[in-house]
Image (cartoon, helix red, strand yellow):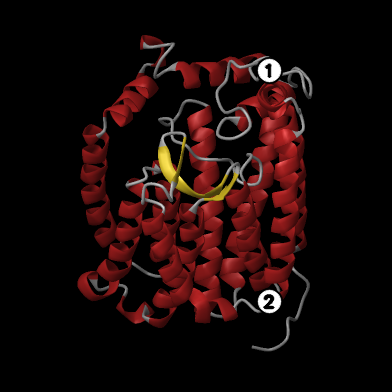
C-alpha cells in the first residue's frame, strides 16, 4: 500500500481525547471516597488509571502510524495466544478471582483480562478470514458456520470464568462484522433464535443469573439484594436533574452505589453533571461511532473496512450495554464504559484498537 495520503480523522482524535479526559476526571471524582477509605489515598485509582492511559496513548500513537495491513499477518498468532490465555486463566492458582470471576492474570492490584485481548484478536482474525473468503459468506455451512463456531468457542471459554459482559461484547461486535461482510439475514436470524434458546439455558443454569433477570424486571422486590445496584444507580441519576449536583458532589459514591468508578461510573456522571453532561458524553461516543463507520465505508480494501467495522462495533456495543444497565434498561452485567471506567486492560486495549482505526482513516478514499 502507498504511503498514507492524509492525516488521521480529526473528529475521531478530538472525541477520543475528550472522552479520555472526562474519564480521568470522573474516575477521580467517583473513586476518591472509596480510595481514601480502603487505601488512605484518594488518588489511588486515578493514579493507576493515568498510568494505563499513558501506556494506552503510547500504543495508540504506535498503531496509528503503523500500516494496518501488518495486523493481517499477525491475526492468527494473536488469536491463538488469546485462546491459550483464556485456558490458562481458568487454572486454579494461576487465574485470579475478582468479583466472583476467575478472569484475571497478574500480581496484586495489577493484572490483565485475557477476555479483553480476545475481543480485539477475534475482530482481527475475522476481518482477515472474511476478507479472504467473502465469496462464501452467503453459504451457511462453508461460509457462516466456521467463523461463528470460532466465536462460539471463545465465548464458551469466557463464560467458564464466567464473564458474560465481555463475552456479549465480543459476540455482538463479531456478529456486526459478519453481517457487514455479507452474511444473509435469514441465516443470522436462524442462528439468533438458536442463540436465544442457548442464552435462556445459560440463565437458568446459574441461579445468580436468574436473580439478575428477576432483579432487572422488578428491582423493588429485593431492594437490598438483586435490585440494589439498579435502585442505587437510579437514585444517582434522578437527583442529577438537568445540570447535576456539581463535579465532586455525588452522594451515591459514599458507599451507596457499588463499583462507582467502574461499571456504574455513568451513574456518577449523570448525578454530578446532570442530563446535559450525560447527553454530551453520549454525543461524543456517537461521533466516535459515526467516524468509525465513515472510515469503514471509505477504507481502500475489504480487510480495512471489516476491521474498522469490528473495532467500531466493540465501542458501540460496549457503550450500549453499559448505559443500558445503568439506566435499568438491561439486566446487570459486569462491563465497563469505554475510555471512562477504571480498568487497565480495557483502557489500554481500546486505545490500541482505536489507533488501528485511526490508521485506517489515513487511507480513506
- 216 relative to 184, above or below: above
x, y (%) of residue 315?
A: 56, 51
Q: Would residue 50 be found to the left or right of residue 237 on screen? A: right
Q: Can you name the residue that lies furthest to the front here?
A: 93
Residue 320 percent location from the top left of the image: 51, 41
Local SS, label 1: loop
3D distance between C-alphas at marks 1 and 2: 45 Å
* Label 1: few (<14), some (14–19) or many (≥20) C-alpha neighbours in 10 Å: some
* Looking at the image, residue 234 lies above or below residue 174: above
At x 66% / y 75%, what residue is drawn? 364
Q: Mark 2 highlights which residue?
A: 66
Q: Which residue is drawn at 40% across and 15% down?
A: 225
Quadrant assignment, res 76: bottom left
Q: What residue sits right under mark 1 in the picture? A: 241
Quarter that holds the C terminus: bottom right
> Is residue 16 in view?
yes
Mark 2 Cα within 10 Å, few/some/many (few <14, many 20+)? some
Where's residue 331, x and y in %? 40, 30
The quadrant holding residue 125 is: bottom left
- Quadrant, the N terminus: bottom right
Query: Is residue 324 rendered to the left or right of residue 138?
Result: right
Q: Nearer the viewer, residue 89 or 183?
A: 89
Amino acid at each position: 500500500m502507498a504511503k498514507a495520503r492524509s492525516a488521521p480523522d480529526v473528529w475521531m482524535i478530538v472525541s477520543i481525547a475528550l472522552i479520555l479526559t472526562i474519564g480521568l476526571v470522573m474516575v477521580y471524582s467517583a473513586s476518591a471516597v472509596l480510595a481514601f477509605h480502603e487505601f488512605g489515598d484518594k488518588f489511588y485509582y486515578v493514579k493507576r488509571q493515568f498510568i494505563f492511559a499513558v501506556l494506552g496513548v503510547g500504543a495508540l500513537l504506535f498503531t496509528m502510524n503503523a500500516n494496518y495491513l501488518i495486523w493481517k499477518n499477525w491475526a492468527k498468532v494473536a488469536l491463538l495466544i488469546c485462546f491459550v490465555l483464556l485456558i490458562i486463566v481458568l487454572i486454579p492458582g494461576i487465574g485470579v478471582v475478582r468479583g466472583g470471576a476467575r478472569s484475571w492474570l497478574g500480581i496484586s492490584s495489577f493484572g490483565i483480562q485475557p477476555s479483553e485481548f480476545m475481543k480485539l484478536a477475534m475482530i482481527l482474525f475475522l476481518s482477515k478470514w472474511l476478507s479472504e473468503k467473502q465469496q462464501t459468506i452467503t453459504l451457511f455451512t462453508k461460509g457462516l458456520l466456521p467463523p461463528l463456531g470460532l466465536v462460539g468457542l471463545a465465548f464458551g471459554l469466557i463464560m467458564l470464568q464466567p464473564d458474560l459482559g465481555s463475552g456479549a461484547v465480543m459476540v455482538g461486535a463479531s456478529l456486526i462484522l459478519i453481517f457487514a461482510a455479507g452474511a444473509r439475514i435469514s441465516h443470522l436470524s436462524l442462528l439468533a433464535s438458536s442463540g436465544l434458546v442457548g442464552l435462556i439455558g445459560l440463565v437458568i443454569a446459574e441461579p445468580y443469573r436468574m436473580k439478575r433477570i428477576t432483579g432487572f424486571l422488578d428491582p423493588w422486590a429485593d431492594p437490598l439484594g438483586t435490585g440494589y445496584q439498579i435502585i442505587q444507580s437510579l437514585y444517582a441519576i434522578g437527583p442529577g436533574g438537568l445540570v447535576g449536583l456539581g463535579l465532586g458532589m455525588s452522594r451515591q459514591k459514599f458507599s451507596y452505589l457499588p463499583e462507582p468508578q467502574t461499571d456504574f461510573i455513568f451513574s456518577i456522571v449523570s448525578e454530578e453533571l446532570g442530563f446535559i453532561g450525560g447527553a454530551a458524553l453520549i454525543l461524543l461516543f456517537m461521533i466516535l461511532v459515526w467516524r468509525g463507520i465513515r472510515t469503514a465505508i471509505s477504507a481502500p480494501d475489504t480487510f480495512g473496512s471489516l476491521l474498522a467495522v469490528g473495532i467500531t462495533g466493540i465501542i458501540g456495543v460496549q457503550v450500549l450495554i453499559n448505559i443500558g444497565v445503568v439506566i435499568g434498561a438491561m439486566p446487570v452485567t459486569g462491563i465497563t464504559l469505554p475510555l471512562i471506567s477504571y480498568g487497565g486492560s480495557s483502557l489500554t486495549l481500546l486505545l490500541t484498537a482505536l489507533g488501528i482505526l485511526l490508521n485506517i482513516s489515513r487511507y480513506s478514499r
